[in-house]
Amino acid sequence: MGRFVPPSRRTRARAETPGVREKFLLFRVGDEIYGMALRGLREVLLSDGVALLPASPSQVCVALAHRGHRLPVIRMRALFEGAQAGMPAAARVLLTEGQGRPLGLLVDEVLEMVEVDPAHIAPVPALATLLDPACFRGLFTRKDRVILLVNEHGLGGADEVLQFNAAGT
Amino acid sequence: MAQANAAPVEVSLGATATLIFLVAGKQFAVDLARVERILDYRRPTRTPRRPPHVEGIIQHEGRYLPIMSLRKRLGVEGPGPANPAILLLTGIGRDPVVGVVVDQVLHVLSLPPDRLLLPPPRVFGIRAEFIRGVANAGGRPVVWLDESKLLTSAEAITLLA
């Protein structure tokens, strides 16, 4: 009889096997397209079910009231573009886990799911962004467009998220 | 301009082959040995929270290259030419190759040491720390840049007329 392997571990093992394609959810922030690994995604919340607690417009990490809990949500547009982030009708919160704690990513629009060979994921050039390299898993090309993949664990280690969790708010 | 490999050039003993190009009407040079290719301009994918002079990333022959605007690095305001060029340069920062957008590529110039002058404290508003030397080419000054220092520094520069 084969050894029992939890579903999450099975998924991870599959994804790390060379030549096996990994699934990513693509989403839009501003004019650019980004992706995150589907295996890290817990739930996608519609914008009309999301109540972000009051915060200054430029604040990167805000609180989300969700099923009796207050979760940190990163407004990706504020993080990536320094822009004051509103809540467009197509906006969604991607619920994931960053460094073992719940984390939401507020994106402008969810687009589609794609499969990518992990061997085709390259590192992000050092000079391309001022953000911590840990925020990105890498990048790949789809339809002549370069798509950056976020790393939810790196985002969960962002100063704003750590301060949110430390404050217990 | 078609994609081109940097062409070999005859260089006299002790001289350095440089590539001459224009930014905002001024002649600049970089060490030709650092120029891997010259590409037609194409719009990069914008990257999040990039430095002001970084335009984004392009993919070229399977590699992902950060693209920087020399106009923006030198604080030149206003739109550039419709068809700028991208110099692929090696040896800048931690990335193996970076793309640098310039207004127009002119020619290759051999710079012997006796034609090079030490720069004054500032040339066109650029501090001497970012300059390897200054030369005269056809009656016009050429500023030989230390591209590695220039492109990895955060010091603000405003190119003067």
Image: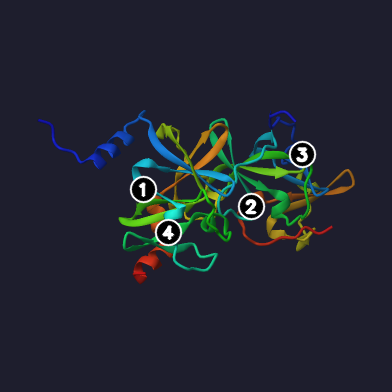
| Mark toward the viewer: 4 or 2 | 4
The three-letter amino acid code for the residue at tag 4 is Val
- Comparing B113 with B135, the one in front is B135
Q: Give the spatial CA distance, label 2 vs label 1.
A: 42 Å
Q: Are marks 2 and 1 in contact (CB under 8 Å)?
A: no
Whether residue A11 is visible here, answered yes or no, is: yes
Judging from the image, what secondary structure is the residue with disc 4 in?
Answer: strand
Q: Position of residue B128 (x, y in %)?
A: 72, 59
For residue B110, which numbered disc appears in the image? 3
**In this figure, which residue is indicated by the disc labeled 4?**
A73
- Look at the picture and state if A137 lies above or below A19: below
Q: Residue at x 38, y 31 (%)?
A: A21
**In this figure, which residue is indicated by the disc labeled 1?**
A43
Q: Position of residue B139 (x, y in %)?
A: 90, 47
- Comparing A41 with A123, the one in front is A41
**In this figure, which residue is indicated by the disc labeled 2?**
B151
What quarter of the picture does the C terminus of chain B occupy?
Answer: bottom right
Judging from the image, what secondary structure is the residue with disc 1 in?
Answer: strand
What quarter of the picture does the N terminus of chain B occupy?
Answer: top right
Q: Residue at x 45, y 37 (%)?
A: A121
Q: Give the spatial CA distance, label 2 vs label 3.
A: 23 Å
Residue at the far right in the pictured view = B139
Whether residue B111 is visible here, answered yes or no, is: no
